[in-house]
């Protein structure tokens, strides 16, 4: 209640409580590491290589039972997702089987015939089959990392030049630290909910990078304006605190609106059992909340610690 009252009165001491927030972030990162060690990382076929089979069918088929049947026949771990062929309006069952060599033609023939016999009433039929080589998966991973690296580089350069008045280069570096924090939280959501690390993961990460950096730039812009108004005698800690208090309401309102929309999408995906939607919307919710948190409670406190390092040395 006290924190809420302070924020309402626009005098919440963000920086005075920085140790609490930074400790909380550290704990969350450690928990993600522990969860990863316990549950492992489920890489998609795009990264590991294997075979992707797409079947069309009528009526209703349990994806859980279908997955179990596929794994019994192939003796390989399968990932099964339900979708729709927009051209024919038919329901589809997408099967991903990870392996270095892919599923041979004979194995595909055996699998399809066995499934057709079991699901004869559903008019099951194979409409496409494709192999993904492990080398292609590595190339995909490298391209994703390059995309993220370039995004980080452009962000640092942009902030450095736009916010020269508030020590632009250091502001850019700490903005990147905030983005890395958000990526770790998104990764943790994928691990926690046992979602595959696939193209959806990269889409969520790139979305969060844009969303989170926008919040950070808004705060930096406010800091620049308040610093200009305060003049050379203005205390940087007070300026940043004031700027955060002025931005917090706008940031929370924007996030609530977006998160609410994503919750609705997640509910729809959950009701209809569309894993491809859930594996995008659910981690995105975690990433958006983390984006607000990192801007307010990680990036700015760390940046202030860097800006006031000289004073702390003198006081020591």
Image: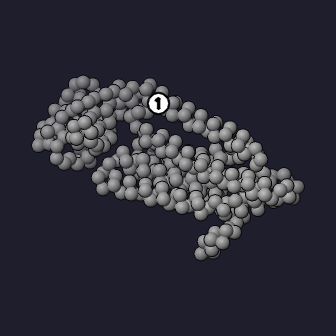
Question: Vertically, is 201 above or below 220?
Answer: above
Residue found at x 62% / y 49%: 178
Q: How is the image coloured?
A: one colour
Question: Vertically, is 236 above or below 138?
Answer: below
Residue found at x 30% / y 51%: 273
User: How far across and how far down the image is residue 39, in percent?
Assistant: 44, 48
Question: The residue tagged with tag 1: helix, strand or loop?
Answer: helix
User: How far across and how far down the image is residue 76, in percent?
Assistant: 30, 36
Q: How many marks?
A: 1
Q: Quadrant of residue 45?
A: top left
222 and 190: which one is in front?
A: 222
User: How far across and how far down the image is residue 65, in percent?
Assistant: 23, 47
166 and 287: which one is in front?
A: 166
Asked whether residue 249 appears in the rendered view, the answer is yes
- The image quadrant where one finds the N terminus is bottom right
Please indicate whether residue 114 sits to the left or right of residue 279 in the image.
Answer: left
- The image quadrant where one finds the C terminus is bottom right
Residue found at x 77% / y 47%: 165
Return the residue at label 1: 140
Question: Vertically, is 3 above or below 284?
Answer: below
**Residue density around tag 1, few if under 14, some if 14–19, many if 20 or more, within 10 Å:** some
Residue found at x 41% / y 43%: 196
User: How far across and how far down the image is residue 262, in percent?
Assistant: 43, 54
Q: Tell which residue pokes out farthest to the right in this image.
A: 314
266 and 9: which one is in front?
A: 9
Asked whether residue 194 appears in the rendered view, the answer is no
């Amino acid at each position: 209640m006290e924190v809420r009252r302070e924020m309402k009165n626009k005098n919440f001491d963000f920086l005075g409580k920085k140790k609490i927030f930074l400790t909380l972030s550290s704990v969350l990162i450690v928990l993600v590491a522990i969860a990863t060690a316990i549950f492992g990382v489920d890489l998609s076929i795009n990264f590991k290589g294997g075979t992707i089979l797409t079947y069309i069918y009528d009526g209703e088929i349990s994806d859980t039972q279908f997955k179990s049947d596929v794994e019994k026949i192939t003796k390989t771990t399968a990932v099964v997702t339900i979708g729709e062929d927009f051209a024919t309006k038919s329901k589809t069952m997408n099967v991903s089987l990870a392996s270095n060599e892919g599923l041979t033609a004979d194995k595909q023939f055996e699998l399809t015939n066995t499934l057709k016999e079991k699901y004869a009433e559903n008019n099951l039929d194979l409409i496409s089959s494709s192999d993904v080589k492990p080398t292609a998966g590595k190339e995909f991973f490298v391209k994703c990392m390059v995309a993220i690296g370039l995004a980080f580089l452009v962000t640092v350069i942009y902030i450095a030049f736009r916010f020269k008045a508030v020590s632009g280069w250091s502001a850019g570096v700490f903005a990147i630290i905030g983005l890395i924090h958000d990526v770790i939280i998104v990764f943790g959501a994928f691990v926690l909910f046992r979602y595959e690390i696939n193209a959806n993961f990269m889409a969520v990460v790139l979305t969060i990078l844009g969303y989170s950096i926008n919040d950070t730039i808004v705060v930096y812009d406010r800091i620049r304006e308040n610093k200009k108004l305060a003049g050379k005698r203005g205390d940087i800690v007070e300026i940043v605190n004031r700027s955060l208090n002025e931005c917090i309401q706008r940031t929370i309102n924007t996030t609530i609106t977006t998160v609410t929309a994503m919750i609705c999408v997640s509910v729809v995906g959950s009701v209809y059992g569309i894993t491809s939607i859930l594996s995008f919307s659910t981690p995105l919710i975690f990433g958006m909340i983390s984006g607000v948190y990192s801007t307010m409670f990680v990036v700015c406190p760390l940046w202030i610690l860097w800006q006031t390092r000289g004073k702390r040395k003198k006081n020591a």
